[in-house]
Image (cartoon, rainbow, N blue to C red):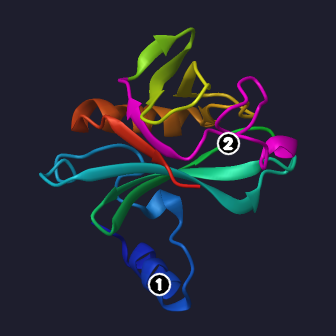
């Protein structure tokens, strides 16, 4: 249940056209029994116009059910100077992931972290792609915050999410 302050913040944000603070999204910290209800979940990532302090683009990994955004985690993909480089046919150039659909693997241990394998569902020469915790991103989807990647991993495991779409 939302507190009165959070509810007012969400209503005012909506009226002013401002995005809700990610921490106030219902699935931000991971799934709950109520959120694991039947219905198609959609996992996407997109580059925003916002920048990290060092100039790298802020990406968002977002979870939706229908039109409802359940969670939104900050991420990076590609380094600052390569945001507009060829993303589909130039492996190793530190460009962001190419736009399109990917098969998403289940989270696996990767050193002290997690790795989610990504397999493009389109033609590309890029390989060894994934989602993991790092910063900056050099071609994968990098989620710098440990709590965020843990929440994403919980969603992928418990809801059986097996696809991610890179939108832009």
- Tell me where residue 144 appears, x and y as whole percent: 65, 36
| SS type, badge 2 | loop
Q: Compared with residue 161, is residue 114 higher up or lower down, i.e. above or below?
A: above
| SS type, badge 1 | helix
Q: Main secondary structure of the magenta part?
A: loop
Asked if the magenta segment contains residue 91, the reply would be: yes
Query: Which residue is at the far top?
Result: 111
Residue neighbourhood size for the residue with mark 2, other residues' Cα within 10 Å, grouped as few (<14), some (14–19), many (≥20): many
Q: Earlier in the sequence, mark 2 or mark 1?
A: 1
Residue 76: assigned label: 2
- Asked if marks 2 and 1 touch (Cβ < 8 Å), the reply is no
- Tell me where residue 104 appears, x and y as whole percent: 39, 31
Query: Which residue is at the far bottom?
Result: 15
Magenta-drawn segment: 80-106
- Tell me where residue 19 appears, x and y as whole percent: 54, 73
| Residue marked by disc 1 | 14
How far is disc 2 from disc 1 in space, using C-alphas?
26 Å
Number of the front mark, 2 or 1? 2
**Residue beneath the point at 17% across and 53% down:** 34
- Tell me where residue 134 appears, x and y as whole percent: 67, 28
């Amino acid at each position: 249940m939302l507190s009165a302050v959070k509810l007012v913040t969400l209503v005012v944000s909506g009226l002013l056209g401002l995005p809700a603070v990610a921490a106030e999204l219902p699935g931000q910290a991971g799934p709950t029994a109520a959120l694991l209800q039947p219905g198609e979940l959609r996992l996407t990532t997109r580059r925003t116009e916002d920048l990290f302090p060092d100039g790298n683009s802020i990406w968002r990994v977002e979870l939706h059910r229908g039109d409802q955004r359940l969670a939104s985690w900050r991420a990076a993909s590609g380094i600052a100077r390569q945001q507009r480089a060829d993303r589909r046919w130039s492996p190793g150039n530190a460009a962001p992931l190419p736009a399109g659909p990917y098969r998403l693997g289940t989270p696996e241990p990767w050193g002290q972290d997690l790795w989610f394998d990504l397999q493009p569902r389109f033609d590309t020469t890029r390989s060894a792609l994934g989602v993991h915790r790092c910063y900056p991103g050099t071609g994968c989807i990098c989620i710098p915050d440990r709590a965020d990647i843990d929440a994403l991993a919980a969603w992928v495991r418990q809801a059986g999410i097996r696809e991610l779409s890179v939108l832009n």
